[in-house]
């Protein structure tokens, strides 16, 4: 039997009832809201699913860079990440394996503060692609769905 790794104790998402798409999200002791913007029929009561995905990638990137710089003893004072996602035509994507249709592209802009050398900055940029969420998004992902009995 293959070894499985539990990353989280689970996330529960339920319709909130405050609008067509409003969601109550529970992650352990944390409470969040999710929704779609008004332009897509929601009430904008919380971030959209894609915004939550980008927030996950951004926070993972920041934490990974912070841990790596601390382990190396590098003078990283602050890190900030800005993320944007869009669907683009595969033919317009030079680095994509997909040749037809559309692909999701995430642009991640990383700002590093502190007296870092050019070599340290370049290494931190490489490390950003190694954060666990980045690896998950760029690897094969299997989602198993079932109905509760």
Image: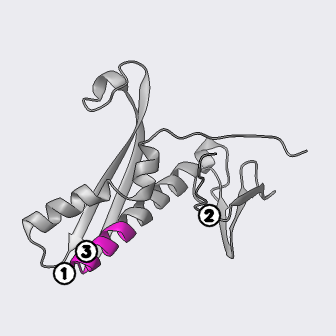
* Magenta stretch: dominant secondary structure: helix
Expressed as whole percent of the image width and height from the top left, the position of residue 144 reads 68, 40
Q: Residue furthest top?
A: 100
Residue closer to the observer: 13 or 126: 126
Crowd around label 2: few <14 · some 14–19 · many ≥20 (10 Å)? few
Is residue 87 inside the magenta stretch? no
Q: Which residues are magenta?
A: 62-77
Expressed as whole percent of the image width and height from the top left, the position of residue 146 reads 78, 40
Q: CA distance from mark 2 to mark 3?
A: 25 Å
Question: Which residue is label 3 attached to?
Answer: 69
Crowd around label 1: few <14 · some 14–19 · many ≥20 (10 Å)? some
Where residue 6 sits, quadrant-wise, is bottom right
Q: Residue furthest right?
A: 149
Label number found at residue 75: 1
User: Please, what secondary structure does the residue beneath circle 1 have?
Assistant: loop
Residue at 49% x, 60% y: name it: 56
Q: Is 4 left, or right, of 98 in this rendering?
A: right
Find out whether the residues at labels 1 and 3 contact each other: C-beta distance under 8 Å: yes
Q: Is 124 left, or right, of 81 in this rendering?
A: left
Q: Which image quarter holds the C terminus?
A: top right
């Amino acid at each position: 039997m293959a070894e499985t790794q539990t990353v989280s104790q689970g996330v529960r998402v339920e319709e909130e009832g405050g609008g067509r798409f409003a969601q109550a999200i529970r992650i352990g002791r944390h409470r969040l809201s999710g929704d779609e913007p008004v332009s897509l029929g929601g009430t904008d009561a919380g971030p959209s699913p894609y915004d939550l995905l980008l927030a996950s990638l951004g926070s993972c990137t920041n934490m990974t860079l912070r841990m790596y710089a601390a382990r190396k003893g590098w003078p990283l004072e602050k890190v900030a990440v800005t993320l944007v996602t869009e669907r683009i035509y595969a033919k317009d994507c030079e680095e994509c394996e997909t040749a037809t249709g559309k692909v999701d592209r995430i642009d991640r802009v990383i700002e590093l503060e502190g007296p870092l050398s050019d070599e340290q900055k370049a290494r931190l940029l490489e490390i950003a692609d190694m954060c666990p969420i980045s690896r998950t998004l760029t690897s094969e992902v299997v989602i198993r769905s079932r109905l509760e009995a």
